[in-house]
Amino acid sequence: MFLAGLVYFPWTLARLVLRIRRERFDVVNLHFVGAPAVFVLLARWFARFRLVVSTHGDDVEGLAARGWFDRWVFRSLLRRADAVTACSDFLLDQVLRIQSSTKLKSQVIHNGIQPSPAIAAESNGGIFAAGRLVPKKGFDVLLRAHATDRTKSRLTLIGDGPERERLEELARALGLNGEVRFAGGQDHARVLEEMAAADVVAIPSLQEPFGLIALEAMSLGKPIVASRVGGLPEVLDGADALLVRPGDADELSVAIDSIRNRLRSDATFGTRNRELALRFSARRMVDRYLQAYQG
């Protein structure tokens, strides 16, 4: 592997530099500082272009666990970048803790979505959650919260990942037979259909730099229960939503019950979230990136 790296590393770098020169790119926007980062960093020595570095989550939050070389590349990119973006105020604060000298050239560009079309879906009275089945998503906390639900409502969990078997075992151990549906990975249209049919969207994350699922739930006019962590409070500011302590199954359970009680007296609770979601339009996101490219 080492010898292969000695051969392919300079070849890959040379191809990148030649492509930038041949196409005369004015801007290179590196999204998520991962494996390609070192090539982009070195390309600055051989080609002229405006460098925009866009951070999105694990590239920042997982940096401390990576090796010294990855940390050096990350800091060097931030120093040499012409502009730095983050998808939330929370994440930008993390970036500036790593390299405070980037403050004057940094800005937040929130993720954006196209407004979801109205989906005609009969309410199933259930709870909906979606995401990759990994520890940081906190789905084990949601299962423990759901175990206290005396209404025996259905929890639909869409997504797949390395935690699926453990979560299924936990659901059985909690006696949730028939009350939890592990739907696996689904296409985006199906995710929106399932979300539209639920009464409440739950986001029990332990770590969440932005929270795109929260934005999609808002776009559908759904009430939300989410952890008070990362960028979720920014996305849900002013929304029909309740925020809870991350990792607290009891508080999560109480919040879900509170929203369902509210829905019994006000069936429109959550619908105004559709208008609030327009703050995060894809058009606005694109315009902000174009401004960053122009300098």
Image: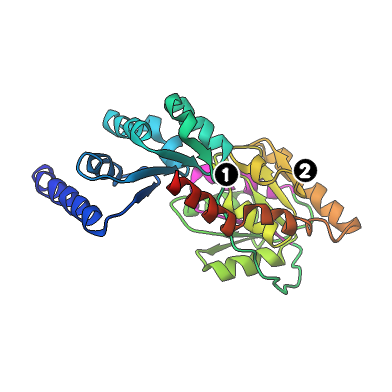
- Residue 130 tag number: none
Q: Which residue position is annotated with label 2?
A: 254
Q: Are marks 1 and 2 in contact (CB under 8 Å)?
A: no
Q: Position of residue 226 (x, y in %)?
A: 67, 45
**Callout 2: few (<14), some (14-19), or many (20+) C-alpha neighbours within 10 Å?**
some
Q: Can residue 146 be seen? A: yes
Residue 230 location (% of width, % of height): 58, 38
Please say whether residue 195 is one of the residues in the magenta stretch: no
Which residue is depicted at the point 72% across and 53% down? Answer: 276
User: If the image is split into quadrants, where does the C terminus sit?
Assistant: top left
Where is residue 134 shown, x and y percent of the image? 48, 47
Task: Mark 1: give few (<14), some (14-19) or many (20+) Cα within 10 Å.
Answer: many
Return the residue nearer the eye: 135 or 179.
135
Q: Position of residue 91 (x, y in %)?
A: 52, 37
Residue shown at the point (48%, 41%) measured from the top left = 85
Residue most toward the right? 265
Chain part drawn in magenta: 126-148
Query: Residue 215 falls in which quadrant of the image?
Result: bottom right
Residue 141 on the magenta segment: yes
Dot placed on the residue nearer the N-terminal end, 1 or 2: 1
| Position of 246 relative to 47 (above/below) | above
The amino acid beneath tag 2 is Val
Mark 1: secondary structure: loop
Residue placed furthest toward the bottom: 120
7 versus 160 height, above or below = above
Q: Quadrant of residue 238?
A: top right
- Secondary structure of the residue carrying tag 2 is helix
The residue positioned 69% from the left and 72% from the top of the image is 119
Foreground: 72 or 40?
Answer: 40
Q: Which residue is mark 1?
A: 138
Q: Amino acid at mark 1?
A: Gly
Relative placement, left or right, of 267 versus 31 is right
